[in-house]
Amino acid sequence: MGLYAAELLGPLPADRQHPITGGIEQAGSCNLYRLEPKPELSEYAGRLWIDWGKGFRAWIQRGDRVPKPIVELRRTFSEDPFPGFPALILDLSQIETIPASWSAALSSTRGIYLLSCPRTREQYVGMASGAEGFLGRWREYFATCHGGNVGLKSRDPSDYRVSILETVGTGATVNDLIALEVRWKAKLLSREMGGLNRN
């Protein structure tokens, strides 16, 4: 949480890559701002926890318009410890707000994951095989709501729950991951029992 002064610089002057989704933002499609941290709340950095309400995914919050209750004020800055891969359960909407140490662990590890839809109770088994590991793959879902998967495209967007089924070492090949993914699909019947896997 931070307090910033925002100076409007004007429309985006040239096409650029979106910093989160990787897509292209076209010139003039949005405004650019210069953000400058203000010192008024600097002593609370990493210590003050806010209830953002229903607008928690918005890139800006206006505390002067809608009250934002304080949930916790910690004595010192500390991140919650990483729970470990087997115990990790997150909603996709939490991906961009997890502690830095969690992001580092998830982006450096590949393997098999499970997406679950809390609304429909459907499941999807997938593999994270890219350079950014689990975190990179989950960011695709967060940005697109389907990650390019046919089964997910056929459903209304959902705040899927993500968890890790199995991790692999650095020596594992894509073929190794494909074999593990097939095994987990069979174990969880994610194709046969109304699951979201289509292959």
Image (cartoon, grey):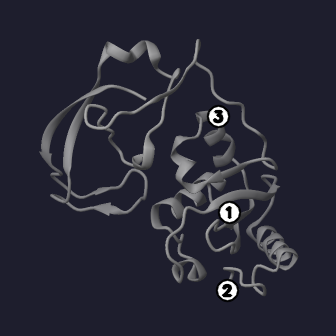
Q: For this view, does 130 lie left or right of residue 96? A: right
Considering the numbered disc 3 on the image, is that residue within a helix, a strand or a loop?
A: helix
Question: Which amino acid lies under the numbered mark 2 shown in the image of this protein?
Answer: Arg
Residue 129 circle label: 1
Alpha carbon of mark 1 to alpha carbon of mark 2: how far?
A: 19 Å
Depth check, front residue: 102 or 22:
102
Q: Nearer the viewer, residue 124 or 149?
A: 124
**In the rendered image, which residue does mark 2 sit on?**
198
Residue at (57, 77) in percent of width and height:
152
Q: How many marks?
A: 3
Q: Is residue 193 left or right of residue 78?
A: right
Q: Residue at x 50, y 76 (%)?
A: 156
Tell me where residue 81 appears, x and y as whole percent.
72, 31
Q: Earlier in the sequence, mark 1 or mark 3?
A: 3
Circle 1 residues within 10 Å: few <14, some 14–19, many ≥20: many
Say which quadrant the N terminus sits in. Answer: top left
Q: Is residue 103 above or below residue 146?
A: above
Residue 30 picture quarter? bottom left
Q: Of discs 1 and 3, which sits in the foreground?
A: 3
Q: Residues within 10 Å of mark 2 (few under 14, many from 20)?
A: few
The quarter holding residue 183 reads: bottom right
Q: Position of residue 113 (x, y in %)?
A: 73, 62
Q: CA distance from mark 1 to mark 3?
A: 20 Å
Of circles 1 and 2, the one toward us is: 2
Q: Earlier in the sequence, mark 2 or mark 3?
A: 3
Could you tell me the amino acid type at mark 3?
Answer: Ser
Q: Check disc 3 and report the residue beneath it.
A: 101
